[in-house]
C-alpha cells in the first residue's frame, strides 16, 4: 500500500553526480544532504564542479568521523556514488564516469560495477559475469534490471525498480532512466527470469 516513488533510494547530488543508498533511509538522506553541501561549497569556492574522487573521499571522511566518537553512532547506510568529471581541456565530454562504493565505516573503493544491500553478494557475482567494457548503458539496462529482479528479497512485496545513469545518453549528467526504457528493461528482465525458470522445470 506504499505510494510509488515515496521511498526513493537514488538521489541527485549535483548535475554530474548521483547517489544510491542502501540501509537506513534517514541516514541515507543525511548522507545525500552532506554530499550536496560538499558539491555546493566546492562550486561556490572554485567555480567548477567537484571532481568525482574528491567528492567520494570527502563523503567517506564524513562517514568515518561518525565511527570515532562515543557521542554519535556510525551511519547505518552505505552508498554508491556515480559521477562524471569535467571534460579535459579541449574535449567536449568526459571519456567515462566513475563509480565509488562507500561503506558504513567510511572506506571508499572505485569499481567498474558493484552492489550494496541485502543481495549484494549474489548481485556482485552476476555483475562479474557481464562484459561491462563491451556494453553500452542502454544495453546494460536489461542485464542490470534482471540482476536486481533476481536478487531482491522476495518477501519485499513493495519492490520498486529504480534506474539512473551518468553516461553519453544523459549528456554526462546524472538522470533517471526515462520511464519507457526503465519499463522495457524491467519487462524484459521478468520475461527472461520466467523463461529461465520454465527451462529448469
Image (cartoon, rainbow, N blue to C red):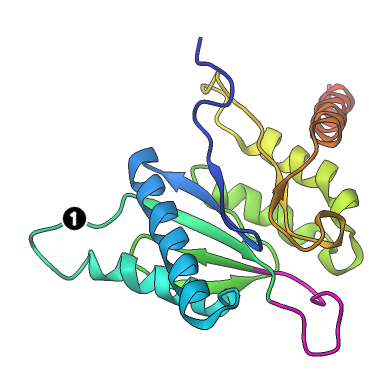
Q: Quadrant of residue 94?
A: bottom right
Which residue ends up furthest to the left in the rendered image? 71
With respect to residue 149, does 29 lie above or below? Answer: below
Q: In this image, 8 relative to 173: left or right? A: left
Question: Residue 86, percent across and down?
Answer: 70, 77
Q: Which residue is mark 1?
A: 73
Q: In this image, 19 relative to 183: left or right? A: left
Question: Per the image, is 96 magenta?
Answer: yes
Query: Magenta part mainly helix, strand or loop?
Result: loop
Q: Nearer the viewer, residue 117 or 9?
A: 9
With respect to residue 92, does 120 lie above or below? Answer: above
Question: Crowding at label 1, few (<14), some or many (≥20) Cα neighbours within 10 Å?
Answer: few
Which quadrant is home to the C terminus?
top right
Q: Residue at x 68, y 75 (%)?
A: 85
> In the image, which residues are magenta?
86-98
Q: In this image, 10 relative to 199: left or right? A: left
Question: Per the image, is 112 magenta?
Answer: no
Q: Residue at x 51, y 26 (%)?
A: 6
Amino acid at each position: 500500500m506504499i505510494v510509488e516513488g515515496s521511498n526513493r533510494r537514488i538521489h541527485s547530488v549535483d548535475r554530474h553526480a548521483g547517489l544510491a543508498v542502501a540501509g537506513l533511509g534517514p541516514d541515507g538522506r543525511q548522507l545525500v544532504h552532506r554530499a550536496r553541501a560538499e558539491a555546493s561549497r566546492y562550486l561556490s569556492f572554485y567555480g567548477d564542479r567537484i571532481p568525482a574522487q574528491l567528492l567520494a573521499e570527502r563523503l567517506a571522511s564524513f562517514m568515518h568521523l561518525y565511527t570515532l566518537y562515543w557521542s554519535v553512532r556510525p551511519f547505518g547506510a552505505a552508498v554508491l556514488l556515480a559521477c562524471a568529471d569535467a571534460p579535459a581541456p579541449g574535449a567536449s565530454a568526459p571519456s567515462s564516469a566513475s563509480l565509488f562504493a562507500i561503506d558504513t565505516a567510511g572506506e571508499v573503493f572505485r569499481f567498474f560495477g558493484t552492489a550494496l544491500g541485502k543481495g549484494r553478494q549474489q548481485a556482485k557475482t552476476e555483475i562479474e559475469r557481464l562484459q561491462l567494457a563491451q556494453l553500452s548503458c542502454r544495453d546494460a539496462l536489461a542485464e542490470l534490471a534482471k540482476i536486481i529482479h533476481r536478487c531482491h528479497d522476495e518477501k519485499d512485496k513493495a519492490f520498486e525498480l529504480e534506474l539512473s545513469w551518468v553516461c553519453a545518453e544523459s549528456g554526462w549528467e546524472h538522470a533517471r532512466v526515462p520511464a519507457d526504457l526503465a519499463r522495457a528493461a524491467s519487462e524484459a528482465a521478468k520475461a527472461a527470469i520466467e523463461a529461465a525458470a520454465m527451462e529448469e522445470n
